[in-house]
Image: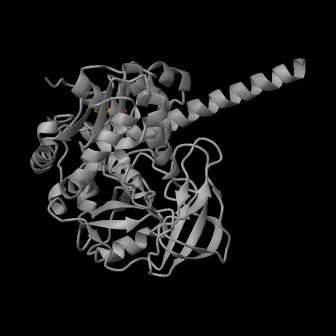
Amino acid sequence: MLHQFFGGVHPAEHKDLTEHKATAPLAEAPAQVVIPMSMHVGAPCKPVVAVGDEVKMGQLIGETTGLGAPIHASVSGKVVAVEARPHGGGGMMMSVVIENDFQDTPDPSIQHRDNVDALTGAEIIEIVKNAGITGMGGAGFPTHVKLSGAVGKVDTVILNGAECEPYITSDHRLMLERGEAVIGGARLIAKAVGLKEATIGIELNKPDAIEHLKSLVGAAGDVHIEGLKTRYPQGAEKQLIQMITGRQIPPGKLPADVKCVVCNVATAAAVWDAVTEGKPLTRRGVTLTGGALTEPMNVMAPVGTPVSHLLKMAGGFKENPDRVLFGGPMMGNPIFNMDVPMMKSSNCILCMTAKEAADQDPAQTCIRCGKCVEACPMHLTPLFMRQNVDKRQWSAVEALNVMDCIECGSCNYICPARLPLVQSFRTAKFAIRDEAAKAQAAKQAKEAAKA
Ligand code: SF4
Ligand code: SF4
């Protein structure tokens, strides 16, 4: 029986713009791709190619220097720059720029594998590592690190097919179009962590995907497909675990602390491609959508494709967008420079009209209605947190557990005063981490002086 999570909201879905549109290859491949050396949680990769090098599609171009995932060429062609370029996360990032030769010549390392069933869990994790797979639905945590940390510690594998953010349909289309890869990836992930079963959670607003995946699993019964009530933020890791297992992750703890590991369905498909075909993660499905776009669509695009090129493929703007975001309206990040490239975690580019964005503006004064408290799935008190952020009282904000905020934006959505609550919590988290780092550095300096 499924459980419930506290709070949450039900924003207008707007998925009808693209949910029936099959994922199509780009009508024109990009002339250049700009591949940032950081698309993951951890240290940026070190480029291992130089200007003038000819590269094949899938060739290693960035190797890890610590926690991270390697990076591969997403097209074949010639390296024309290795330099800092604008990054979707803000600021500049060392990037490898490849001039596309439009041949998509594969790297010789990409080979079909016949002996998949004979692979051990450790061998699967090694393949995932070398393929540069990172979480494709969120922050981009290296998948091999997540899986190796789960071995022997978890009893439940969950795949996230909820896709609860409004507008986004790339995972929905993936489950319909590549269901075998999703189910196969689920089995491989389960095997990698030492289990035999997995559960895929999908919101009930995608009944065709639920039925399709159920039919693919059939009598095998080792991958359970659970339909979840449509409620944002159903796809947040903590809420998904609670819905499927009834287990609550305590503040400051991780899924492994309640014996669960969660991966996105797109990540599972990438695991399947890496293990069965030897393909590194170099392309992904992206939803191009929003009322400002001429022709909303789902596309399969090489990592590193400039946003400007993707928007051109969707017919450009039919009216000036009020804002363009990576991701959905609840958790998306604004794009200010249309030349930044899409990354491994880019599931959507949303171009909102002023009318669509009007719900979020303008900010007024808190009327103490308490709706943000009711909506918060993490049992936080956004109105009090915000008051203390305004006063820059970081210790008070921390005492109100701001570090547990999953930045889902439910409080923003429900707030009648349209206060930018989640933005202020991001500021507070940054300030708290910064103060802690400074305190740690001061302590170390003091100890070094004593020694
Ligand atoms: S929902 Fe907005 S207006 Fe209502 S209490 Fe929370 S911050 Fe204040
Ligand atoms: S305080 Fe954080 S976790 Fe709670 S509703 Fe707001 S954004 Fe979501």
Q: How is the image coloured?
A: one colour
- Specify the quadrant of the image occupied by residue 380: top left
> Which quadrant of the picture is home to ligand 1?
top left
Position above or below: 264 against 429: below
* Residue 132 appears left or right of 112: right
Residue at x 39% of width, y 60% of height: 112
Position above or below: 238 against 415: above
* Residue 169 appears left or right of 206: right
Residue 364: give x, y in percent of width and height.
Answer: 33, 42
Can residue 389 be seen from the camera position used here? yes
Question: 146 or 43: nearer the eye?
Answer: 146
Please identify the quadrant where the N terminus is shown.
top left
Residue at x 38% of width, y 29% of height: 194
Residue 203: give x, y in percent of width and height.
Answer: 17, 41
Position above or below: 391 against 333: above
Residue at x 61% of width, y 49% of height: 64
Question: 128 or 361: nearer the eye?
Answer: 128
Question: 191 or 3: nearer the eye?
Answer: 191
Residue 319: give x, y in percent of width and height.
Answer: 27, 73
